[in-house]
């Protein structure tokens, strides 16, 4: 086991902890701000392999590793977005957020919906991590440089989060349309 794999495992454990907490707690749906985390992680995930792999030839197995991991990440992210619980944030009539809030705090104060994926989302997250670890060891045996690169973990994480946000936002938009058409303020989502 080389240092790259050890750093990958440590990064995975850190990501598991952070995302596990986020899966289980209600978080506001913040519109465009929800895309910031996947974008930042993707940029870092692309830059790291470029620095690590400078001078190395990218082979067929590297491309296979990237494609396989992205497909798994998108599929599980889509499932997470589809199974997420969504609820309208209850606010008193005439609610106005306090003046002078930061952009992030203002976005949270004006959010209309909140979401969490709960235990099943957490289970899918564990599946994603397990698949990633298994593929990492498999791609190392097959000689893939990208398959064991730390940056690929971040790219997989970004793809998963982006797929989740995409599906989640489509569901929230559909709930808004349904609510506006029916005139009902009550929305029940499993």
Image (cartoon, grey):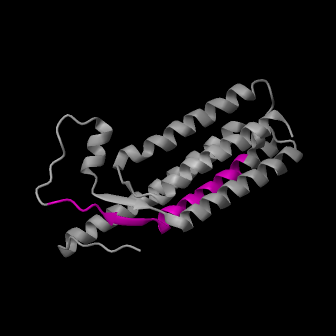
Name the foreground residue: 10 vs 178: 10
Q: Is residue 75 visible?
A: no
Looking at the image, residue 100 lies above or below residue 165: above
Which of the 4 quarters of the picture holds residue 25? bottom left
Give the quadrant of the C terminus.
bottom left
**Magenta: predominant secondary structure element?**
helix
Left/right placement of residue 169 relative to residue 131 reads left
Q: Nearer the viewer, residue 91 or 47?
A: 91
Residue at the extreme left:
94
Task: Name the residue nearer the viewer: 91 or 166.
Answer: 91
Q: Position of residue 160 (x, y in %)?
A: 57, 53
Residue 65 appears left or right of 78:
right
Identify the residue at horizontal 29%, vertical 45% (top origin). Answer: 107
Is residue 8 visible from the viewing direction of this image? yes
- Name which residue lies at 21% across and 72% down: 181
Q: Position of residue 126 (x, y in %)?
A: 65, 59
Judge whether residue 128 is colored magenta.
Answer: no
State whether residue 179 is above or below residue 99: below
Magenta residue span? 66-92
């Amino acid at each position: 086991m080389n240092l790259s794999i050890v750093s990958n495992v440590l990064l995975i454990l850190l990501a598991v902890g952070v995302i596990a907490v986020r899966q289980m707690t209600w978080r506001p749906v913040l519109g465009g701000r929800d895309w910031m985390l996947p974008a930042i992680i993707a940029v870092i995930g692309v830059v790291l392999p470029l620095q690590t792999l400078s001078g190395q030839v990218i082979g067929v197995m590297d491309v296979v590793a990237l494609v396989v991991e992205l497909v798994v990440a998108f599929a599980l992210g889509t499932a997470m977005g589809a199974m997420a619980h969504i609820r309208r944030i209850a606010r008193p009539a005439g609610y106005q957020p306090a003046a002078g809030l930061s952009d992030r705090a203002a976005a949270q104060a004006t959010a209309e919906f909140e979401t969490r994926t709960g235990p099943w989302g957490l289970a899918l997250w564990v599946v994603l991590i397990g698949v990633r670890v298994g593929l990492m060891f498999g791609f190392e045996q097959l000689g893939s440089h990208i398959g064991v690169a730390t940056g690929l973990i971040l790219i997989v994480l970004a793809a998963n989060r982006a797929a989740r946000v995409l599906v989640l936002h489509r569901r929230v938009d559909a709930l808004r349309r349904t609510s506006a058409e029916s005139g009902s303020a009550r929305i029940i989502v499993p």
